[in-house]
């Protein structure tokens, strides 16, 4: 029968094409950054700006000459003027790391200082659209001065949409650097290429939803007659993970159990390491006799190189969306990859590689229509940051995993770095370990980077009214300088997020939470409901380190200067903040809040990322007298479970309301007489019917795990949401959500292990928190 798609005419293929053509390309310009966008003739460029934020624009024609008039204004919103790039120059004169990054970008785009004398300036609009009558390069400068911790003028990202005049079926992103090889693998084919140790391999899905089998062989071993190729079983065994990902568990191993390649960047995060490359047998068993397969294509190109043909090649299938179901079957669906998605590898040895563009058109594995794969090879001298890329919205381009302003100091103390909510964070530190870090926090003082928390500046005449409706807490009761912990709920009562709200002024608030999407949702709600409020994402402008433990106040008192009108560290009450400086009145501006996530006396120090290293160094140096320890997220998890503090996707999610998550105190149903999101849904639920968050102390030393079911006799009555070994209690403990009739203290329950029936761990219900039930230490 052959490959059906090969025999279709272009018109017929387009008619049957189940993947939508690319009519829009969604991009962005990060805060305090420059970006270049290539427009074809008749394309439109749409820019969506945060309220009150301006940008600056340069335009080049196809010959590389600056020609501002060529970019035609379509929607005359706001003020479009020509003048000096004031915002860009203000950022450049700061002469800090933010300025240096912008200088590098301008050099990369060949922008001279003189080019900044005349730019297009866009102000006082939230959307503007331009038209390109001919091919143009548009450089958008989303620039400006740093925001200090006591300010709220954050520069937010600018959303960019390129409206294509001619629809296209693929998007090939700009190279990460200058490639030394560009290899196009046409649909339903495969190609080989040689890579030297240290070189980089970028495999790009140009149309989206296209699988690419990858083979790699030790080139030196091949020259000696040995076939040492990638081995999925060896890789899974060594890593203890189903697939490698950027970070600690990043390497693919060969049949000799030695690393061949390492995953450095991945914009998809879903690949297959369980199945072989598609083979003649696969198609024959499906009734498609003679169908081209990846195995056929590999045999054809590898046999002349001395590799024996195989009935089915064991391969790493990038972008193939498979997963092992609880019943044991391996399911498959269309790939997660979008046009332009890629995986970046680094070779550990000289390699012979082969990549396919899978021909499967009989199921969703390639979105039903096979397309091309593009491969780029970069020199070993290039450097690319590790990144498990992610998306806040499914249609946007992927976001790089970030390093906080404290990263250089953290990386000097540990290599145990993991990705968490788009940031690299420390799991634990060399020379300490999770238990020592935990004990330092309980007994002395410890410091931990919590920059991964998201920050949003909420200002405007309706800011208080807006937050009163959006948050469960009574925001109107907050004094300036005060903080409240709150849930933020859907109209169903389910929790979208939790966080802390800081009141900086009468109409000025800062919301600190865990999920970046919460800010998007707040913006959407403000627009839908007509509130006069500005919501800006300030996470790139404020980084924070928590200093926790019984001696944290003693330590910080030596470092933080506060003006007379601000409370000093001795005067700072629980859930309040103060504004001051590091060292003295001329020091780095900081905000210090009496907050934490440990159940201990503790503080958080907030600063601009350009000052983060100095803040870390000052705390670390002064902390030596107190035997300070750096703390990772493993120790933090132990501390917060003992303290009965909740965590997203464990104790709560969008189907769990605050009462069921154990934070009913954040929902004043009786005293808050105004309406707020989720109020009616929670009122409709009787208190007697709610599942409750309780503590469990296990009788044995075996650990419970997140997701274990809680049983009475044969049937489950709850679920373990978090669990740890408590050094303080010398017991295995767990947080769990159980049916109300089993939530009383001293109730005996069982944690189901294995299949839930074959093995049980006895446990008793206790009230929360496990540690310091009166919370006297955190209030000290």
Image (tube, rainbow, N blue to C red):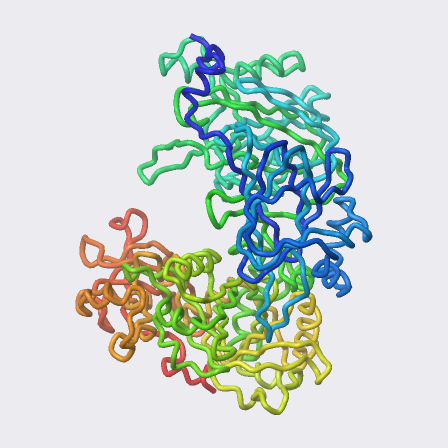
Question: Where residue 28 appears, x then y in whole percent?
Answer: 58, 48
Question: Where residue 544 appears, x then y in whole percent?
Answer: 58, 69
The answer to whether residue 105 is left or right of residue 267 is: right
Answer whether residue 113 is visible to the viewer in this image. Answer: yes
The answer to whether residue 572 is left or right of residue 415 is: left
Question: Where residue 334 appears, x then y in whole percent?
Answer: 42, 31
In the image, what residue occupies the spot 82% across and 52% down? 114
* Nearer to me, 64 or 308: 64
Locate the N terminus by quadrant.
top left
* Nearer to me, 130 or 687: 130
The answer to whether residue 410 is left or right of residue 21 is: right
Task: Indicate the quadrant where residue 479 lies.
Answer: bottom left
* Nearer to me, 16 or 740: 16
Q: How many marks?
A: 0
In the image, what residue occupies the spot 54% across and 37% down? 163
Question: Where residue 116 appears, x then y in whole percent?
Answer: 77, 53
In the image, what residue occupies the spot 30% across and 56% down? 655
Eyeballing the image, is 26 above or below 762?
above
Answer whether residue 197 is visible to the viewer in this image. Answer: no
Eyeballing the image, is 723 above or below 476?
above
Eyeballing the image, is 367 above or below 404?
above
């Amino acid at each position: 029968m052959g490959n059906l798609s090969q025999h279709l005419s272009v018109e017929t293929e387009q008619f049957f094409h189940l993947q939508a053509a690319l009519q829009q390309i969604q991009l962005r310009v990060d805060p305090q950054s420059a970006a270049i966008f290539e427009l074809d003739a008749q394309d439109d460029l749409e820019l969506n700006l945060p309220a009150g934020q301006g940008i600056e624009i340069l335009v080049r024609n196809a010959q590389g000459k600056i020609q501002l008039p060529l970019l035609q204004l379509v929607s005359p919103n706001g003020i479009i003027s020509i003048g000096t790039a004031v915002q860009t120059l203000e950022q450049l004169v700061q002469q800090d790391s933010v300025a240096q990054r912008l200088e590098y970008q301008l050099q990369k785009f060949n922008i001279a200082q003189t080019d900044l004398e005349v730019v297009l300036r866009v102000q006082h609009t939230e959307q503007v659209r331009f038209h390109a009558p001919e091919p143009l390069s548009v450089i958008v400068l989303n620039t400006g001065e740093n925001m200090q911790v006591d300010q709220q003028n954050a520069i937010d990202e600018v959303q960019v949409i390129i409206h294509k005049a001619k629809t296209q079926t693929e998007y090939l992103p700009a190279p990460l650097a200058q490639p030394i090889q560009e290899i196009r693998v046409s649909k339903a084919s495969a190609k080989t290429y040689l890579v030297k140790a240290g070189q980089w391999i970028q495999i790009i899905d140009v149309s989206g939803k296209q699988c690419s089998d990858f083979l790699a062989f030790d080139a030196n071993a091949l020259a000696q007659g040995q076939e040492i190729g990638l081995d999925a079983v060896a890789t899974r065994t060594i890593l203890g993970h189903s697939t490698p990902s950027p970070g600690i568990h990043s390497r693919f191993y060969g049949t000799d159990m030695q690393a061949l390649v390492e995953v450095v960047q991945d914009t998809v995060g879903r690949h297959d390491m369980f199945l072989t490359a598609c083979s003649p047998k696969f198609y024959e068993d499906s009734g498609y006799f003679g169908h081209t397969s990846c195995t056929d294509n590999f045999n054809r190109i590898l046999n002349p190189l001395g590799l024996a043909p195989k009935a089915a090649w064991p391969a790493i299938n990038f972008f193939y969306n498979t997963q092992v179901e609880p019943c044991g079957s391996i399911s498959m669906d269309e790939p997660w990859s979008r046009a332009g998605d890629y995986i970046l590898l680094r070779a550990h040895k000289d390699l012979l590689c082969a990549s396919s563009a899978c021909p499967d058109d009989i199921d969703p594995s390639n979105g039903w229509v096979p397309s091309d794969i593009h491969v780029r090879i970069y020199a070993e001298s290039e450097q690319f940051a590790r990144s498990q890329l992610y998306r806040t919205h499914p249609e946007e381009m992927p976001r790089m995993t970030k390093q906080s302003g404290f990263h250089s100091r953290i990386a000097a103390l540990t290599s145990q770095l993991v990705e968490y909510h788009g940031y690299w964070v420390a799991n634990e530190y060399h020379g300490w370990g999770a238990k020592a870090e935990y004990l330092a926090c309980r007994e002395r003082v410890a410091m931990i980077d919590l920059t991964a928390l998201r920050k949003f500046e909420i200002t405007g005449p309706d800011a208080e009214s807006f937050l009163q409706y959006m948050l469960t807490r009574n925001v109107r009761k907050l004094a300036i300088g005060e903080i409240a912990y709150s849930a933020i709920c859907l109209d169903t009562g389910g929790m979208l997020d939790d966080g802390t709200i800081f009141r900086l002024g009468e109409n000025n608030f800062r919301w600190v939470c865990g999920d970046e999407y919460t800010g998007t949702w707040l913006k959407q709600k403000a627009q839908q409901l007509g509130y006069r409020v500005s919501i800006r994402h300030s996470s790139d402008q404020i980084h924070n380190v928590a200093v926790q433990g019984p001696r944290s106040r003693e330590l910080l008192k030596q470092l933080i200067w506060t003006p007379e009108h601000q409370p000093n560290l001795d005067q700072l009450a629980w859930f309040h903040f103060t504004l001051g400086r590091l060292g003295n009145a001329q020091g780095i501006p900081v905000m210090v809040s009496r907050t934490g996530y440990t159940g201990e006396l503790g503080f958080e120090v907030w600063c601009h990322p350009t000052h983060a290293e100095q803040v870390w160094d000052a705390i670390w140096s002064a902390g030596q007298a107190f035997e300070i320890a750096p703390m990772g997220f493993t120790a933090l998890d132990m501390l917060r479970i003992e303290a009965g503090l909740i965590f997203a996707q464990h104790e709560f999610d969008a189907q769990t309301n605050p009462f069921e998550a154990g934070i009913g105190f954040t929902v004043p149903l009786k005293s808050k007489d105004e309406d707020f999101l989720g109020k009616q849904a929670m009122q409709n639920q009787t208190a007697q019917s709610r599942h409750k968050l309780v503590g469990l102390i296990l009788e044995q030393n075996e650990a419970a795990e997140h997701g274990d079911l809680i049983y009475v006799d044969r049937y489950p009555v709850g679920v373990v949401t978090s669990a740890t070994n408590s050094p303080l209690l010398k017991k295995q403990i767990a947080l769990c959500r159980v049916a109300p009739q089993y939530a009383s203290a001293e109730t005996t329950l069982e944690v189901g292990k294995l299949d839930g029936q074959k093995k049980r761990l006895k446990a008793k219900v206790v009230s929360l928190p496990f540690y310091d039930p009166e919370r006297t230490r955190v209030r000290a």
